[in-house]
């Protein structure tokens, strides 16, 4: 597939009538293994028809409930486009999910967007995806409509991992429970966060374990359960082992949740830099220690464990996921 991908948003949605396309539609939050199966079917389409993905921002549930963040995202738009392209998409249409769009009936969405605007000669959909008002545009609806409108239809069944059906809901649940390894199995890659390093209180530096305090680039991304994690850290096109704490630093009586990571074997200034954290495993709960000395001893143990976990991973495993 070409390295280039066409990306359109509402303001330049389908600027002119294009050739025939094979189209899939969905939120594709996280682009997990179930989504990747759909993309594989899309990529297998014969040449001559544009492989097209229609997706939505913000998440429909967030938009409908008028509560920003009500549905924390597993991916931001940039990440989603990257993974859709890697899966074989040649063209991505990001529709702003509004009340007006939500009021389109399933037939109107099919006619106006999928068939008229995109000239779709084939639709590929997940077995449980639906669109249009009251979510009536499901696979049964499309099965009945394909004869009337003359398009081909392929319905992709559920994708299983360890006997469980993969879904974005289950990825969110796993991350909310701190089970980042299970989330990784569902996603087909480690979950990650990206942010800018900002100044903190310098407590870690005082204990000889300097930490980078992260301000997330996309505030709507889901933050896994509080605790201490082994992570891979991407900075300046290099990958370092790291130990991450998501929590309130109870030993020092603080209450605000912070995301701070210590990069093992890193030397240099990080303030202002953008770094990414790949979650490998959760080590333990955050806890309150009786003294800084006890905390430092625990941090030393955490660092040893994090380094061993990082070194047990396949070489270059994380570079492929980060860069």
Image (spheres, helix red, strand yellow):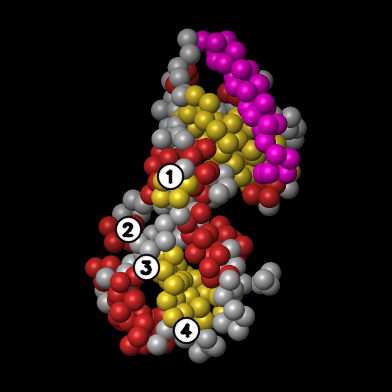
- Of 105 and 35, the residue lying toward us: 35
| Residue wearing tag 1 | 163
Closer to us: mark 1 or mark 4? 1
Q: How much space separates mark 3 and mark 1, taking CA atoms?
A: 33 Å
Q: How much space separates mark 1 and mark 4, taking CA atoms?
A: 34 Å
Q: Is residue 266 above or below residue 63?
A: above
Q: Residue at x 57, y 44 (%)?
A: 190
Closer to us: mark 4 or mark 3? 4
| Residue wearing tag 2 | 61
Precedes in sequence: disc 1 or disc 2: 2
Q: Are marks 3 and 2 in contact (CB under 8 Å)?
A: no
Q: Is residue 15 magenta?
A: no
Q: Are marks 3 and 1 in contact (CB under 8 Å)?
A: no
Q: Residue at x 67, y 27 (%)?
A: 307
| Residue wearing tag 4 | 121
Q: Are marks 1 and 4 in contact (CB under 8 Å)?
A: no
- Of 83 and 101, the residue lying toward us: 83
Q: How much space separates mark 4 and mark 2, taking CA atoms?
A: 29 Å
Q: Residue furthest front?
A: 163
Give the x, y percent position of residue 208.
Answer: 67, 20
Closer to us: mark 1 or mark 2? 1
């Amino acid at each position: 597939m070409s390295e280039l991908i066409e990306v359109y948003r509402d303001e330049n949605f389908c600027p002119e009538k294009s050739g025939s396309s094979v189209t899939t539609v969905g939120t594709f939050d996280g682009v997990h293994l179930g989504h990747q199966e759909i993309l594989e079917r899309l990529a297998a389409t014969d040449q001559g028809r544009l492989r097209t993905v229609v997706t939505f921002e913000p998440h429909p549930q967030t938009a409908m409930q008028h509560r920003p963040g009500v549905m924390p995202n597993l991916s931001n738009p940039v990440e989603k486009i990257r993974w859709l392209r890697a899966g074989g998409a040649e063209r991505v249409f990001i529709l702003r999910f509004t009340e007006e769009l939500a009021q389109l009936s399933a037939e109107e969405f099919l006619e106006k967007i999928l068939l008229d605007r995109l000239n779709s000669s084939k639709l590929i959909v997940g077995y449980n995806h639906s669109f249009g008002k009251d979510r009536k545009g499901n696979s049964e609806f499309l099965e009945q409509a394909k004869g009337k409108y003359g398009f081909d239809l392929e319905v992709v069944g559920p994708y299983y991992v360890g006997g469980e059906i993969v879904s974005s809901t289950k990825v969110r649940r796993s991350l909310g429970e701190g089970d980042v390894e299970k989330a990784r199995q569902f996603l087909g890659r480690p979950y990650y966060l990206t942010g800018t390093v900002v100044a903190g209180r310098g407590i870690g530096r005082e204990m000889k374990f300097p930490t980078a305090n992260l301000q997330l680039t996309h505030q709507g991304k889901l933050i896994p359960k509080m605790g201490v994690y082994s992570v891979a850290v991407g900075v300046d096109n290099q990958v370092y082992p790291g130990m991450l704490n998501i929590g309130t630093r109870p030993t020092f009586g603080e209450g605000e949740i912070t995301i701070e990571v210590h990069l093992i074997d890193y030397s240099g200034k990080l303030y202002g830099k953008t770094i990414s954290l790949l979650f490998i495993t959760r080590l333990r709960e955050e806890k309150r220690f009786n003294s800084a000395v006890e905390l430092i001893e625990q941090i030393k143990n955490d660092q040893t464990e994090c380094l061993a976990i990082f070194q047990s991973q396949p070489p270059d495993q994380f570079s492929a996921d980060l860069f």
